[in-house]
Image (tube, grey):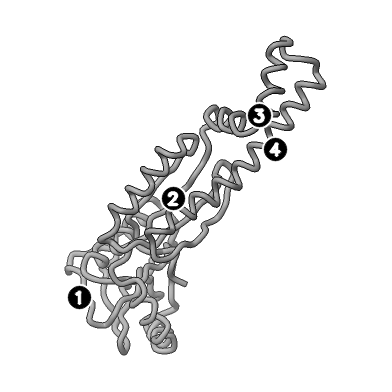
Amino acid sequence: MSTYVYGIARSSHPSLPEEAKGVGDPPRPVRILRQGQLAAFVSDAPEDLRPKRRDLLAHQHVLREAGEKGTVLPLRFGGISPDDETLASVLAEREDHYLERLLALDGKAEYNVKASHDEEAVLHRVLADDPQLRAMAEAGRTAGGGSQEQKIQLGERIATAVQLREAADADLVRARLEEVVEEVNAGPQSTGWLTNLSFLVVRERGADFLNAVDELRKQQPHLVLTVTGPLPPYSFVE
């Protein structure tokens, strides 16, 4: 039977309680597979695993329970090995690498920050920063909006200014927040976000990181910052 893998830890890591349940319907019991200096939290893999809410939550719960007892390298949902023996061989082969990552992640958690613009606030910001653009907008209002050509020209100038502001603000978010973290990784970009960043933060400095986010919000009120965490350090594990 295939083996479902939740995460990797040191071999000295305590096992989870016997009642710990993993993915599947009914939920599969979670066990620990030890190999050399490493251990993996595993269960038997369901035959037809799908990213259902129940199983996603079970995966997260196992990692949360294990993470409370020590450092764990979290696998994303859906990690399956053909069997225990194959997994053990991978742990043996990559032992030095996994031990290095465990050491690097000791006492740390991940915080994800997504940044976007408040559309009205950023419009005020770009007009305030560009006297010529502000004069064009005021002249258009005075002339009842101006001609169609003038409206198009103004719209294009504003759009360009906003795009430049987006790039500058993406750099600003990273620069301000990376001062209080250990590592930064850029996440997938998508429509609606200026930037999507994951920060590796010493757990004892979690409050400092959140305070830095709040300070950035106060200084740059046109930014909308969405913070998720603390999380298992998914973005810092290969």
Residue for badge 3: 131
Question: Which mark is first along the chain, 2 or 4?
Answer: 2
User: Cα distance, mark 2 to mark 3?
Assistant: 32 Å
The image quadrant of residue 214 is top left
Describe the element under mark 1 as helix, strand or loop: loop
Q: Which mark is residue 113?
A: 2
Residue type at the position of mark 4: Thr
Q: Nearer the viewer, residue 142 or 151?
A: 142
User: Cα distance, mark 1 to mark 3?
Assistant: 63 Å
Task: Please report the residue visible at 70 percent of the width from the left and 11 percent of the height from the top.
Answer: 142
Return the residue found at the far right: 149
Residue for badge 1: 14
Mark 4 or 2, which is nearer the eye? 4
Mark 1 or 2, which is nearer the eye? 2
Q: Nearer the viewer, residue 192 or 218?
A: 218
Residue for badge 4: 160
Q: Is residue 91 visible?
A: yes
Answer yes or no: do the residues labelled 3 and 4 have beta carbons within 8 Å?
Answer: no
Residue type at the position of mark 2: Val
User: Cα distance, mark 1 to mark 4?
Assistant: 56 Å
Mark 3 or 4, which is nearer the eye? 3
Question: Which mark is first along the chain, 4 or 3?
Answer: 3
Q: Which quadrant: the N terminus?
A: bottom left
Mark 1 or 3, which is nearer the eye? 3
The relative height of residue 119 versus residue 45 in the rendered view (above or below) is above
Mark 1 or 4, which is nearer the eye? 4
Number of numbered discs = 4
